[in-house]
Structure formats: structure tokens, C-alpha cells
Image (spheres, grey):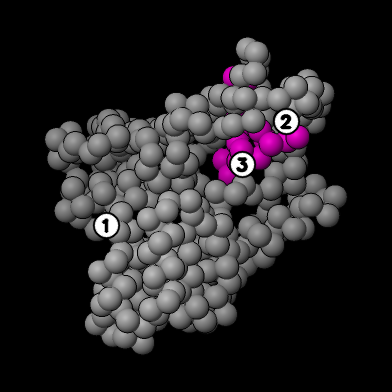
Amino acid sequence: MKIKDTPEDFIVEEISEVKPKKTGEYTYVQLKKENWTTQRAIQQLSRRLRVSRNRIGFAGNKDKFAITTQVCSVWKIEPEQIKHINIKDIELKVLGKGDERINLGDLKSNKFKIIVKEVSKSELENLEKNFPKIKKQGFVNIFGKQRFGSAGNSGKIGAEIIEGNLEHAAKLFITEHGDNERAQEFGKFAKKNWGKWKEIIKECPDFLGLEKAVLNWLIRVSTDFGGAIRAIPKPTRRIFVSAYQSEIWNKEAQKSKAEIINIDPIEIKSMPELNMRGAERRRIVKTKNLKKKVKGKTVELEFELPKGCYATVLVDKLFR
């Protein structure tokens, strides 16, 4: 089977808790994007507004290869400044104002419309068997692959940061990439020429903006890997640490039958700003308004999931 064959096959709408009004220090903006990660979309928006990206808040990281809609808050920026911004494959709609910043987790749920293509006969049989069971009982709420980055190494980077191995963390970030061939070629070059920062940055593609930020720091201070890692925006660095937590939780969830499993807190001496609180996460989660339409070898799915749950995990459970 194929999911995300095109961005139109994977549509996500965030159900926000924000209640806009006419006044406030924050302007609330609906951000609809295609083929952008949330982090890079926010980075581009901050550049166009000529403000620090820290002034832009959002509730969750949405898929890149999809059409996604979410709400952001922008501190001390007037609606008129946003209305004139034009970014390819990004639509911005001012919703109003308010007094509260939007932070990670400030959402109710996410609605999904997903088209699954080239479904085999056995997968259709699995769907018919699994659909009523999952609709009634739910599914194991593990973190999905996108939690761990396109290269699948976010947890490894997080582990190196936690251990204080900051050069290893920087090396993983710069040299390991996902399916993009140009990025993979660059990664191989960087690994082979590690330490030759000026040579490496010449080969760095423009779309790897965060990698360039790390390299620019190392060009100035060649062995300051702590400073280099801090050139990566704090929300992204927190994703690395969170991914490490998620890997541990997934292992526990696959073997533990408890209804709720704890996520342990993490303390990082080398970067205390990345300390992570502990949390509780429900092992089994139920869908809301789960629907399906089967058209030959194509299946259309609609459902709503609580925040922090992964649609790709549900799809895998339905067809497995």
C-alpha cells in the first residue's frame, strides 16, 4: 500500500483551543502549508516578518509531505504585517488577537483525511478484520516514525546531547539525512571532510539552513560544539531530546500492559535549557469518528485523534 503518494492524500487540520478576540499582544494566524515542516515554515515566516522566531508560537509539529492547517501566535506583530506576506505553498489567515502565546501541546486534537492507494487483497482483508476492533477498542499509542526525523536519527542526536557528546551530536545532525539525494551526498562529503568547516559549507545545499547555521558557528569557533548545537533553534533541539524519550517509551509500550506509562524526566547538565519534564501517556488511545470508504484498491479514511497521537501508526494498525 501507499500513503502520502501526494500531499493531497494526507490532510491534517488542527483543532485549536485558541479563542481569538479583537485585542491583545498576540496575533493569531492560521497557517496552511504543503511540503513544509512546521519548523521551517515558522523559520521562513520569522524571516519575512524580520523578527526572532521565538516570537512565533505553535501547538504541534505537522507533517511535511501533507497539506496541514494549524494555528500560530505572533507576539507584537500587527495583522496588516502578516496579510502582505507571500510564501510559496503557505497560506496565512489572520484569525484575531489574544493575550496568550500558543505553546507546544496547546490543542484539542487533529482531524485527518487520508487516501491509501495500491492496497493489496490481504491488506483489504486485514482492514475489514481490524477496523471494527480498533474502532471499539483503540490501538497502542506508540510514537510514529516522523517523531524521529526524516533520517530516523533524532533520538540518537538527543542521546548524544544528554550525554554531553556534543561533537557527536553535531556530526549526526550535519552528516545524516533522509531520502533527499542531494542532502545524502552532502552528508557523505561532510563526514569524509569533518573539521574542514569552510570546505563543508561550500557544499551545503541552501535548503539545509539549520545545518549551515551550525557550520557558520564552527567556522568562527572551530571546536565550540556546544555553541554550534545552540545555533539550532531551541524548539528543534528539544525535539531531539523528546525523540530520545519517545524511543524509550515505545519500547516500554510494546511490552508493558499498563493503562498509563510514565515518560521519565531528563536533566541535561551541558544544556539545562533542554531539561524535559516527565509525563504520563496513555498506552491505548481511541479514535473519534473513524470512517472508511473502499474504492477498488484505494481506501479513504477519516478520523480524529487526541493531541500527540500519530495517524500513520493508526493506518499501519488498520492494514497490518
Choose the circle earlier in sequence order: 3 or 1: 1
Residue on which disc 3 sits:
309
Give me the residue at 38% from left, 64% from top: 186
Where is residue 223 shown, x and y percent of the image? 36, 87
Establish if 304 lies above or below 196: above
**3 left or right, relative to 17:** right
Circles 2, 1 touching at the beta carbon (< 8 Å): no
**241 left or right, relative to 291:** left
Of marks 3 and 2, the one in the foreground = 2
Secondary structure at numbered mark 1: loop
Tell me, yes or no, whether the highlighted magenta stretch contains residue 156.
no
- Crowding near pointer 3: few (<14 within 10 Å), some, many (20+)? many
Residue on which disc 2 sits:
319
Choose the circle earlier in sequence order: 2 or 1: 1
Q: Nearer the viewer, residue 283 or 180?
A: 180
Q: Quadrant of the N terminus?
A: top right
Secondary structure at numbered mark 2: helix
Choose the circle earlier in sequence order: 3 or 2: 3
Where is residue 154 shown, x and y percent of the image? 53, 62
Q: Nearer the viewer, residue 14 or 240?
A: 240
Report how far apart the C-alphas of labels 2 and 1 lie in the structure. 38 Å
Q: Quadrant of the C terminus?
A: top right
Amino acid type of the residue that numbered disc 1 sits on in the rendered structure: Asp
Write down the region rendered in magenta. 299-320
Amino acid type of the residue that numbered disc 3 sits on in the rendered structure: Cys
Report how far apart the C-alphas of labels 3 and 2 lie in the structure. 18 Å
Where is residue 286 shown, x and y percent of the image? 71, 33
Secondary structure at numbered mark 3: loop
Q: Is residue 238 visible?
A: no
Report how far apart the C-alphas of labels 3 and 1 lie in the structure. 32 Å
